[in-house]
Amino acid sequence: MSIRIITDSASDINKEEAKALGIEIISMEINIADNVYLDGDNITREDFYNKLENVKALPKTSQINPYRFSEVFDRVIENKDQAIVILLSSKLSGTYQNAKMLEKQYDNKIYVLDSLNAALGEKLLVLYALELISQNKNFEEIISILEEEKKNITFTARLDTLKYLRMGGRISALVSFFGETLNIKPIIGIVDGEVKMIGKGRGTQNSNKIITKMVVESGGIDETKPYGMVYSGNDASMVESYFENNKSALGIEEGINIYQLGCTIGTHIGPNGIGIAYFKK
């Protein structure tokens, strides 16, 4: 009997990476201009950002329904395995509840875990779960550790534009106008499972400094666990530049893994944003 990890595409793990890691991804549906796509199946992140720049209404993701979960869970049981299912925050989607309602049907062989995160924050929990499996921890031990350690994940991102917050109704058109005029760059974080604005800076350099300050004040990055940076859009140069200019202040001795932000959080950030996620020390 082996322990398997299952997650949703909101974790920003693509199919190729999932295959290499030995995990299973269940794709979320994305509605863009009345066209429905399966995240990572019939739309790439590059295509998503190209479409995002031209939309008149924000794309919407649909929760994964119980039937799709049951198909995956049934295969786990048929193989006589156990599975830990790490999902997008319950405060951002009904996906977690849809999976959780099935849990009792599988005789403690399936455990559905609310990551209280998304994107790279969710992905880090998946990667950490794989590390714990490699350390030969048992099913119950891994669950206990993940439930505790998920509280220490921090995900912070700097937006390049207020446009998508305005389109999503999170700020007014007037606030957006003055913000763009003053070159305000919002800083968002996932706080208690929800996306919230946690700061703002005037201009890219100032807002980048605020992100670094937030990392330091949080207690810093636990380099013994997975961590990384993300960029939204199709150009990684901004996040690469940020890391080179801030790695000393961040306390990172070597390089850092950089990932492209997926559709779920990318919808609210828009292109040219950067973010960092880590377990706090």
Image (spheres, grey):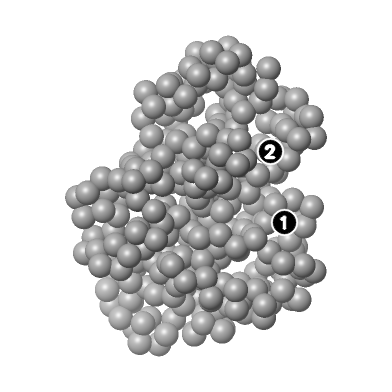
Residue 101: in sight, yes or no? no
Q: Position of residue 31 (x, y in %)?
A: 27, 48
Q: How many marks?
A: 2
Q: What mark, if any, has residue 130 been given in the picture?
A: 2
User: Residue 174 location in percent, x, y?
Assistant: 28, 77
Task: Residue 224 in the image: state x and y as whole percent.
Answer: 79, 52
Q: Is residue 239 left or right of residue 266?
A: right
- Judged left or right of residue 84, residue 271 is left
71 in relation to 200, above or below: above
Q: Nearer the viewer, mark 2 or mark 1?
A: 2
* Residue type at numbered disc 2: Leu
- State the image quarter where residue 65 is shown: top left
Numbered tag placed on residue 12 in the rendering: none
Q: Residue at x 55, y 41 (%)?
A: 18
| Whether residue 205 can be seen here | yes
- Residue placed at 43% from the left, 67% from the top? 233
**Position in image of residue 180 (x %, y %):** 36, 82
Residue at 67% across, 22% down: 2
Q: How many residues crowd around disc 1 within 10 Å: few (fewer than 14), some, or many (20 or more)?
A: some
- Residue in front for this viewpoint, 40 or 95: 40
Whether 22 is drawn above or below 79: the answer is below
Residue beneath disc 1? 280
Of mark 2 and mark 1, the one earlier in the sequence is 2
Q: Along the horizontal axis of the image, is 214 left or right of 207?
A: right
Quarter of the picture containing the N terminus is top right
Name which quarter of the figure residue 36 lies in: top left
Secondary structure of the residue carrying tag 1 is: loop
Point 35% across, 87% down: residue: 181
**Which is nearer the eye, 250 or 8?**
8
Task: Please identify the quadrant where the C terminus is shown.
Answer: bottom right
Give the amino acid at mark 1: Lys
Q: Secondary structure at mark 2?
A: helix
